[in-house]
Amino acid sequence: MAKLNENFFKLKKNYLFIEIAKRIREYSDSHPQEAKRLIRMGIGDVTRPLAPVVVEAIKKAADEMQYRETFRGYEDSGAGYDFLRKAVSDYYKSFGAEVSADEIRISDGAKSDCGNIIDIFGSGNTVLVTDPAYPVYVDSNVMSGNEVIFADSTEENGFAAMPDKSVRADLIYLCSPNNPTGSVYTTEQLREWVNYALENNAVIIYDAAYEAFITEDNVPRSIYVIEGAKKCAIEICSLSKTAGFTGTRCGYTVIPDELVQKDSAGNDVKLADLWGRRQGSKFNGVSYPIQRGAEAVFTQEGQKQCRENISYYQENARVIAQTCDELGIKYTGGVNSPYIWLKCPNGMGSWDFFDMLLTKIQVVGTPGAGFGKNGDGWFRLTAFGTHEATKEAMERLKDLLKK
Amino acid sequence: MAKLNENFFKLKKNYLFIEIAKRIREYSDSHPQEAKRLIRMGIGDVTRPLAPVVVEAIKKAADEMQYRETFRGYEDSGAGYDFLRKAVSDYYKSFGAEVSADEIRISDGAKSDCGNIIDIFGSGNTVLVTDPAYPVYVDSNVMSGNEVIFADSTEENGFAAMPDKSVRADLIYLCSPNNPTGSVYTTEQLREWVNYALENNAVIIYDAAYEAFITEDNVPRSIYVIEGAKKCAIEICSLSKTAGFTGTRCGYTVIPDELVQKDSAGNDVKLADLWGRRQGSKFNGVSYPIQRGAEAVFTQEGQKQCRENISYYQENARVIAQTCDELGIKYTGGVNSPYIWLKCPNGMGSWDFFDMLLTKIQVVGTPGAGFGKNGDGWFRLTAFGTHEATKEAMERLKDLLKK
């Protein structure tokens, strides 16, 4: 009889965004008229189309696939084509981080890598996750049967948890700019985490998916600008938010050569070798045309076009933040981040506020409670909509809450 | 201190194809002149370009991504777009298997799904793998710390292992047409495996990646044509060989609704739910343009164009098989399969034969020993080259072995 992975039963029944989709569907079915004016500011999905240079690059590569002379089959390594790894390495240089092409593996996105990275670690690790957090960090560890402990991100610390030296963690998930809270770690704060990791021989899994939204100087776009980080941190990044690749699928993970841990026999093991072996056995690389599209993101013209889209979203973030200011609602994010993490008015719970916005003004956000216990009473709005929809949603919110 | 997954240390140091690539590179570096005439019949990679309808579909979808009105972000479910799941379901119907679109999840390829499927099973399963086999079956289980036992595929049983009723297995990996041996299970043989699985409450993980090469009537193209298979089998398939997607990346996995196992408390659990949760948490779907390309494979014109490529490879298989016949070399495969699995002449070991072909006639094959102990003394040649290269390689082989 096949034995099942019963760790799965410890997961909450519905993945957060599936639960949201279900509630929207139920509301839409029972209120078809109202549903027509639905504005979605829930899931962190982009709405701006792909940059023209990206589309051109995908099409050109697709054309190559039609001719024997230029057709591409399996990638030799599955780690990503050299042209793309080099482009990512150069991108890192542009904001002051030294990451060689060899230290980069291309993937189909940050979610896959965030979920699969746990495969290289053994059982018995104490896994530290900030609360609230992106659900994949916790879920992938629950699925593997790992113990997860939490560092509290709260209103008091600006939803940016800092290390507690009395706690010993072996693996640490950090995300900056943070999903869902929009908070960021400054250089000084990140240095504190790196030092904590080095002291504990812990490994930081650093999710930098939102780095392109950083505007302030003292906020690092990569953990590798911090001294010592290459000895303790894995960085996972994605083109989903940088270049609107949520439906196009491409990301990358950096494991520096210097990132070495001891095995139980006391031998040094390069984590990059374990990850290479994991990916080499269970992944066959990213589609060639998509890798060419990703390469185009990092060209001068690609950066210009992608930055325009990011500026577009940043304007939305400004509008949402301003509305919160006008309504006297507390929030984090909005600067350095496409997320506004706001305190539900009148002490409402997250899901109650979700239902209220859905049914009263047909605006969909994400209940903070879905990201952890410290998220209850908080709510995430995203800046990924159109200007028109964002403004309209904020007008409706003002009408609703001024009543 | 982060504890590592030390199961990784039990893996052989180099993944088979990485070792082959290394030997080729070393030979090429020391023999640059000879290396120019290298013919690669080792890795199972296609050489025919993508079908024109596939390229057109990818380009059209890429164009859609450039405009706000037609842009696509995250897929709601990550299970694959309805249009593609429906197309796959219809494809199944065309060879007599009833698989609904809901039972299909689209992925980036069979390798990922073969590797990741093990996540839904617990520890303590006895995993049965035929020997020789595709390395991912064993490696993904070794990485998870599972015990693997083997069913011997040998010259005597035509390299198509059958169930041993005295052995109790919980998970069973089958691959037909087989990689690496080119052998196939007939309807009667597959029925025996399905009955064995049903009697043991075991789950079959059925790799059908080469189904498009089947030409004979009594060889099923899906395990689901066997009665009872939907109660015990997961089927994993890929467009890599069907449509030359090795560098384009798209596949699918079927878990029927009827496939239910008991958990330790005696409750029924649908395996499709576990897989959905695994993929929902650790995967974000396949690139939209690539899914449109995959859809085109299943159109009438797409099938016509893809079948032409398969016929092309089948002609190569015929030439290789004929050469073996002329040389009095025993083999399996070549019919229903792009692989010819041949007995190394004069009692040579696989890697010795590999080195001989590489250094004497600059032909690269795959040593059977890389696929398991029963593979030693055997060798895999693939029919995925050009007609010219295949013929040339066979001429060189005849010259070499007739000496």
Image: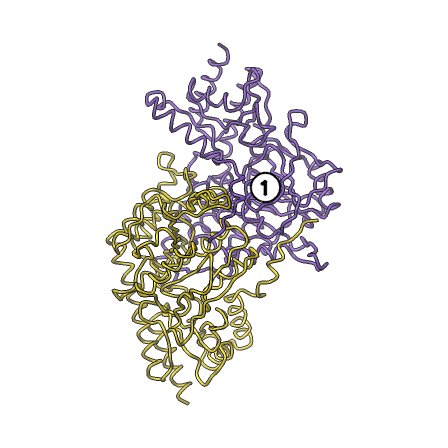
Chain colours: A yellow, B purple
Q: Position of residue B110 (x, y in %)?
A: 53, 44
The quarter of the picture where residue A399 lies is: bottom left
A212 versus B401 height, above or below: below
A110 versus A327 height, above or below: above
| Count of numbered marks | 1
The quarter of the picture where residue A145 lies is: bottom right
Is B169 in front, or is B197? B169
A216 versus A199 height, above or below: below
Q: Identify the image quadrant of the C terminus of chain A.
A: bottom left
Q: Chain of mark 1?
A: B
The quarter of the picture where residue A172 lies is: bottom left
In this rendering, would B205 be left or right of B295?
A: right
Q: Position of residue A91 (x, y in %)?
A: 28, 52
Is A252 in front, or is A168? A168
Residue type at tag 1: Asp
Furthest-top residue in view?
Answer: B403
Furthest-bottom residue in view?
Answer: A403
Q: Position of residue A236 (x, y in %)?
A: 39, 55
B223 versus B341 height, above or below: below
* Residue holding disc 1: B207
Q: Secondary structure at mark 1?
A: strand
Is A182 in front, or is B276? A182
Q: Residue at x 54, y 57 (%)?
A: A146
Q: Position of residue B222 (x, y in %)?
A: 62, 42
Mark 1: give few (<14), some (14-19) or many (20+) Cα within 10 Å.
many
